[in-house]
Amino acid sequence: MKTKPHAIVIGSGFGGLAAAIRLGVRGFRVTVLERHDQPGGRARVFRDKGFVYDAGPTVITAPFLFEELWSLCGKKMSDHVTLVPVAPFYRIRFDDGEIFDYSGDAASMRAQIRALAPDDLEGYEQFLAMSQKIFSVGFERLAHVPFDSWASMGRIVPDMLRLESYRTVYGLVAKFVKNERLRQVLSFHPLLVGGNPFSTTSIYTLIAWLERKWGVHFAMGGTGALVRGLVDLVEGLGGKIRYGATVDRILVDKQTARGVRLENGEQIAADIVVSNADAAWTYRHLVDGRHRKTWTDRRLDRSRFSMSLFVWYFGTDRKYEDVAHHSILLGPRYKTLLDDIFTRKYLAPDFSLYLHRPTATDPSLAPDSCDAFYVLSPVPHLDADVDWARETERYRSAIEAHLGKTIMPNLSRHIVSSRVMTPTHFRHELLSERGAAFSFEPVLTQSAYFRPHNKSEDIEGLYLVGAGTHPGAGVPGVLSSARVLDSIVQMPKWSPAHATV
């Protein structure tokens, strides 16, 4: 192993683990440096009183991106991790209690649209056809392609114009359907990757067809089962994962990454460095400013970042059988609430919620006759004037009361486990710029070439994976960012780093 080129991967989120596997398969000796005591990054696992909570991603789409990692190692994912389809994909509840079950079943979707907005049935079919066209370009052709030059961007401009990428997600949906509730049903997806439907480029409407094509899945044992499976692949290739290892600086000499320095002063040499840390954090805090001409502090200051999240993990001593695996509870406001979150940076008294009930699919994640949940509310990132030390319990109590009043009767009497995550957690625990939950906001001017490149613009041998680089946030995007490495990382000639342990 010491004669192989050495790759350091900063962070063990899905992007970092996928990168470590792909580099290990190609012959690199890989060291993954994780600052926490367990792998997963945002996909860490919390345990309390017999309840198992996935800290982050819960919606698994495009499962072939995971299967490919096992295949690269000569294994079958199904021998190690079981993915099961979730139906409906999401149960959407409007503020007055009306329900819409969003699924991949074409007949069911048509029947529900016929009941909700019969005049929009044809428009819905036209929207879905447009989503498929955008998917065939935006995902199948471009998600794994590096945008590292103006020429690479210029080549897709005709497609972007033809597919109306200048529109927002909501704008494209509104072109086809007129009913406001159906517009909300078809436009909420950007919120799953950190975007405002009223400003996110319509490229992201590809998610509708992506879900229709491959479905929405859940890993038995929780998302943490996928993390453990990927760790096994990394270690099976001879890679090492060091926990409690916080990177303080990426070492650069003659504009080439040479390794890293840890918080404790230890220096580790490497032939290449791959950062799965937040992209903005990587440049602002891990790379000395004199080595950065592109992602300067000034440019980062002017960048737009995604919203943050308020997440409450809780367990109940009873089961709520009527609650679906994935529920979206829309509040009384849509656009104006999103304006509060993304533009005004104001913590509104009302909210829309995503509720995850994994025990609807896998009861083993809670004690017998109990349910595990997490509920998240999109909130402004830390540019907002919010004192979370004072607001946390008030906000959590408001969510608890709302759930108890709507779909979880007598909730307050049955809570036996509780844990909260706020924007300050994203900033201090996950080292995310401004406490943003999904890094750079996915607007058109921060997509593809205009996002931090997978191969650093200024520093040779430095690469980025994860939500903040191309193609963007969400599990498929993060895994695709690691896939990009296959085409941009060259096997280096022998160097002293080859022999560095």
Image (cartoon, rainbow, N blue to C red):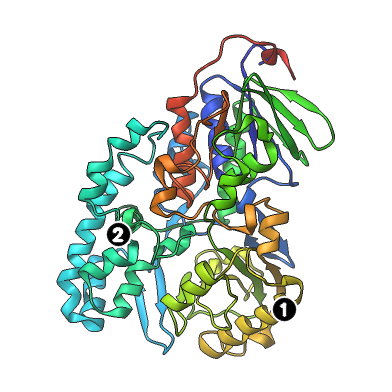
- Image side of residue 153 versus residue 55, left or right: left
Q: What quarter of the picture does the C terminus occupy? A: top right
**Which residue is depicted at the point 76% across and 76% down?**
390
Q: Nearer the viewer, mark 2 or mark 1?
A: 2
Who is closer to the viewer here, 208 or 317?
A: 208
**Residue at the disc numbered 1:** 393
Q: Which corner quadrant of the image does residue 129 belong to?
A: bottom left
Label 1 secondary element: helix
Taking the image as drawn, is residue 12 in sight? no
Where does the image place residue 66, in percent across and percent down from the top left? 46, 42
**Which residue is depicted at the point 31% across and 46% down?**
138
Marks 2/1: CA distance? Answer: 39 Å
Where does the image place residue 58, in percent across and percent down from the top left? 52, 59
Label located before the other in sequence (2 or 1): 2
Who is closer to the viewer here, 202 or 89?
A: 202
Q: What quarter of the picture does the N terminus occupy? A: top right
**Which residue is depicted at the point 56% across and 54% down?**
223
Furthest-front residue in this view: 298
- The amino acid type found where label 1 is placed reads Glu
**Residue at the disc numbered 2:** 167
**Callout 1 environment at 10 Å: few (<14), some (14 to 19), or many (20+)?**
few
Q: Is residue 297 above or below residue 212?
A: above
Where does the image place residue 279, in percent across and percent down from the top left? 58, 43
Q: Is residue 263 above or below residue 370?
A: above
Q: Is residue 415 above or below residue 358?
A: below
Furthest-top residue in this view: 494
On residue 193, the disc is none
- The amino acid type found where label 2 is placed reads Arg
Who is closer to the viewer here, 343 or 66?
A: 343
**Which residue is depicted at the point 68% across and 88% down?**
413
